[in-house]
Amino acid sequence: MPSNSKGVPGLVVAGTQTGVGKTSVTLGLLRTLDREGQTVRPFKVGPDFIDTGHHRAAAGQWSHNLDTWMLDGPVTREIYRRYTHRGDGGQPVDVAVVEGVMGMFDGVGGGDDTGSTAHVARELGLPVVLVVDVWNMARSVAAMVHGYETFDPELDVAGIILNRVGAPAHADMVREAVESSCEAPVLGTLPRREKLHIPERHLGLWLADDPSLESDYLDRLADWVERNIDIQQVMDLAGRASRSRDLWAGDDIRPDREDEQRARIGVAYDRAFCFYYRDNLQRLEDAGAELVYFSPLDDAFPEELDGVYLGGGYPELHAEALESRRYMRRSIRDFCESGKPVYAECGGLMYLGSKLRGEDGVPHDMCGVFPYEIRMGELSIGYGEVTFSDANPLWEPGTSARGHVFHASEIVPGTDEGLEHIYTVRSPDGQIHREGYRRKAVLASYLHLHLGSHPGLAERFVARASAG
């Protein structure tokens, strides 16, 4: 599909470090623009699944990950072009808002900024709005902002948002400090509001549809942003992106979407299984898959499926409910025994095991496709490059792909004895370990693979499913 020749306004919301409020600012901005009638496309730098869910709730549009370690530059640009070209309802997108990750220059290593917010902003030619936490700071804020402005001359640090200001006198002081010493204008000063903080659990923020989350949290964030930030000035800065170099030139690099649906692939999607790269699902559809969504928390397994995709999420929070759905567990187990392909990552791996000990430590029966048991453990997070072994049932032997580990559970030692590992995983720092399990045409791993990291992964999975 050729990209649109005219650019779309866009910007990156970055932070000086983790915890400065860039997610709150992003959500408030998304909701504000949505309330104004703008069609706004959200994106997230890095592999995070939870923030993208909040983005969708705020903007009414799917959010997509942009990751320059898992994906190379052309694929990152193609994803951005593709999803700024149209909204979920087919209407044109008015503006794109990209939320950064960690500090602006923080990536996979210390020697360069690969995988960082700054790297993505340069790849896309987008202006950056920098969020700075100024609590317990005064004129020193200017020194910090000046450093971020000048560290990378190729980066367009276009505006500053000063977060967690105290009394009005403090707001005036930090604004004056920045504006007298730095190039970028101050777009607003946000007063400290602890009650706007989104609660967290072991994998990060509560999910956007968590029943314990206050229903008006997005509108309160929008009110906070609207009252204290010059939204028109923000939009004027976003307009710089429409004039960015060659971002909008060229065609999509993925194959044209198949007109004929070649396979019905079931996708587990509910509060227990909701960690998916949205672009992965789109790539499966482009390859000819009809995606059939179902919930393992219900007891109705779809009929006439050719393959199943079990993504990550929070099965540990729903272990008792998953155990009680005996028909669903039996249906999943029977499907795995049928020889049809099943791809299970992270939460899906946990679900296919014998038992899952949730946060209460009580063992709950799962599908029993594999003999291992799962218990809660330390948080494991990081990138990995996978090479598939000759025994891999889904993708070509020797194929490499990239993904991300993000879990706080572990396999109980010894319960996976005798199982065959089908991955070799190399981390960015060069460490190598074995990962992934197979049984018939079932592939289960803790790694979340991005199907855009290697051409043909989605096509291969759909072709294997359609072959029966």
Image (tube, rainbow, N blue to C red):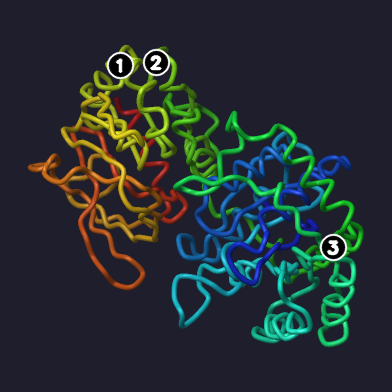
Residue 293 x %, y %: 49, 24
Residue kind at label 3, given as amino acid type: Gly
Left or right: where does residue 82 sit relative to residue 445? right
Residue at left offset 73%, top offset 71%: 134
The mark that comes first in sequence, 1 or 3, is 3
Answer yes or no: do the residues labelled 1 and 2 have beta carbons within 8 Å?
Answer: yes
Q: Amino acid at mark 1?
A: Ser
**437 or 416, nearer to the observer:** 416
Q: CA distance from mark 1 to mark 2?
A: 7 Å
Give the labeled residue for mark 1: 331
Residue 239, label in figure: 3
Where is residue 342 shown, x and y percent of the image? Answer: 31, 32
Against 157, residue 28 (above or below) is: above
Q: Residue at x 63, y 56 (%)?
A: 251
How crowded pointer 3 is (Cα within 10 Å; few <14, some 14-19, many 20+) is rated as some
Quadrant for the C terminus in the image: top left
User: Relative to residue 75, is residue 465 depicted above or below?
Assistant: above
User: For mark 2, what is the residue?
Assistant: 301
Depicted 326 relative to depicted 180: above or below: above
Per the image, label 2 sits on a secondary structure element best described as loop
Which residue, as the protein is rendered here, is positioned at the far left? 418
Helix, strand or loop at mark 1:
helix
